[in-house]
């Protein structure tokens, strides 16, 4: 008889479906909490007004948090006929200490598991983290500091489907990201100039909104700027049609970005500013080129883009699938149960 699991994840396109499908092979996933907001059909005008006001007003934020808390506690009543063995949160958001404590009280012996794919100091769940029995993180520094289990993230099954032969891919360099700083603009502009100089076909885009416009220089290259986010599924299609993906790490982050992990599934090369990637089992200097400063861009040999991608052993590649992710987590949990 399968065990019951309550599953919650971020609403990022495809991740809930991929993880849930794998979980159903092993567990009865009888319910899951889809997001930290109520379902669209349950969002009243009061909720919508309160949510917007809470962004600017501390008192409104307090009432908003109480509203969400009440919503979650009502969910517990919905689940009262189910005895859960596990509560798995993959990059989830706000669950209070009181909620998790009540969930445990109603499900004696249940194990709570959290996977973090952001720096721990940035997640809202850090306030209730000590209620989780197991915490896994993609960031090795956080693991050392807080005693978490280290586990890199994973890629979606769709990334492996309908891949294009490496030599037939349209773009030599691909990057889409937010314009977070002037330094990031300079870096992308330099890659653009480098691509022009050695005749590479690049797809380089920086997303801006009103708040991010301040990072644009006066004479910016308009072709590098977009004002609407590219849908995630289109991003995946472009990655699969690119020879190399550019990965610019956030300065205080040591864990690998999703972009680096997705490149494993799509068999796309990586140029990255995160030199810690050399410590991972999939590192191969034929597939991955590390730079630490803008001056090193011009030193990247054109041959890096021309030479074929060196395929990874299947056991290493499988580790970074959604199935490999779930298997590794529950190997740890069930060994200690």
Image (spheres, rainbow, N blue to C red):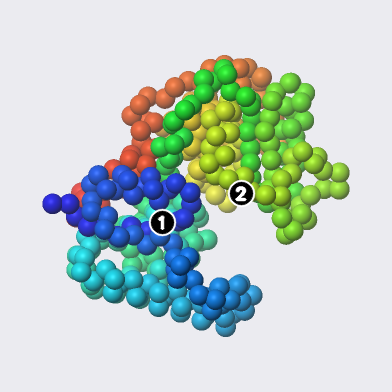
The label on residue 251 is 2
Residue at (44% x, 40% y) in the render: 155
Percent coordinates x, y for residue 118 in the rendering: 49, 54
Please state which of residues 204 and 29 is positioned toward the viewer in this rendering.
29
Tell whether 181 sits left or right of 251: right
Tell whether 165 sits left or right of 215: left
| Residue, disc 1 | 9
Extreme residue toward the left, this view: 1
Residue at (46% x, 35% y) in the render: 159
Between label 2 and label 1, give the one nearer the viewer: 1
Q: Earlier in the sequence, mark 2 or mark 1?
A: 1
Residue at (60% x, 72% y) in the render: 52
Badge 1 marks a residue whose secondary structure is strand
Would you say residue 273 is visible in this rendering? no
Percent coordinates x, y for residue 203 in the rendering: 67, 33
Tell whether 292 sits left or right of 86: right
Please state which of residues 110 and 164 is positioned toward the viewer in this rendering.
164
Residue at (37% x, 24% y) in the render: 313
Image quadrant where residue 95 sits: bottom left
Q: How far apart are marks 2 and 1 (CA)?
A: 26 Å
Image quadrant where residue 301 sits: top right
Badge 2 marks a residue whose secondary structure is loop
Task: Decide: is 80 above or below 177.
Answer: below
Would you say residue 228 is visible in this rendering? yes
Tell whether 264 sits left or right of 245: left
Percent coordinates x, y for residue 217 in the rendering: 82, 48
Please state which of residues 140 and 158 is positioned toward the viewer in this rendering.
158
The label on residue 259 is none
Task: Decide: is 243 above or below 127.
Answer: above
Quadrant containing the C terminus in the rendered view: bottom left
Around disc 1, counting alpha carbons within 10 Å, would you say few (fewer than 14), some (14 to 19), or many (20 or more)? Answer: many
Percent coordinates x, y for residue 180 in the rendering: 68, 51
């Amino acid at each position: 008889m399968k065990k019951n699991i309550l599953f919650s994840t971020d609403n990022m396109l495809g991740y809930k479906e991929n993880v849930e499908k794998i979980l159903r092979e092993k567990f009865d996933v009888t319910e899951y909490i889809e997001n930290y907001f109520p379902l669209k059909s349950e969002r009243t005008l009061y909720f919508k007004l309160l949510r917007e006001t809470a962004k600017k007003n501390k008192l409104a934020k307090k009432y908003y948090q109480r509203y969400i808390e009440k919503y979650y506690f009502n969910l517990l009543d919905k689940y009262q006929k189910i005895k859960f063995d596990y509560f798995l949160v993959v990059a989830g958001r706000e669950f209070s200490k009181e909620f998790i404590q009540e969930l445990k009280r109603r499900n004696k012996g249940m194990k709570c598991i959290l996977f973090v794919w952001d720096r721990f100091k940035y997640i809202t769940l850090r306030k209730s983290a000590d209620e989780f029995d197991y915490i896994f993180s993609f960031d090795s520094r956080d693991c050392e500091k807080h005693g978490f289990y280290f586990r890199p993230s994973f890629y979606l099954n769709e990334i492996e489907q309908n891949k294009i032969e490496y030599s037939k891919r349209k773009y030599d360099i691909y990057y889409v990201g937010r314009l977070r700083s002037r330094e990031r603009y300079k870096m992308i502009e330099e890659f653009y100039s480098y691509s022009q100089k050695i005749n590479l076909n690049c797809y380089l885009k920086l997303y801006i909104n009103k708040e991010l416009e301040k990072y644009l220089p006066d004479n910016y290259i308009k072709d590098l700027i977009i004002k609407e986010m590219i849908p995630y599924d289109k991003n995946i299609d472009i990655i699969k049609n690119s020879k190399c993906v550019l990965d610019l790490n956030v300065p205080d982050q040591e864990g690998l970005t999703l972009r680096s992990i997705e490149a494993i599934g799509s068999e796309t090369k990586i140029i990255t500013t995160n030199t810690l990637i050399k410590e991972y089992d999939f590192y191969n200097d034929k597939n991955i080129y590390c730079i630490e400063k803008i001056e090193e861009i011009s030193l990247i040999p054109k041959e890096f883009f021309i030479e074929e991608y060196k395929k990874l052993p299947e056991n290493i590649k499988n580790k970074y699938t959604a199935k490999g992710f779930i298997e590794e987590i529950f190997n740890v949990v069930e060994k200690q149960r």
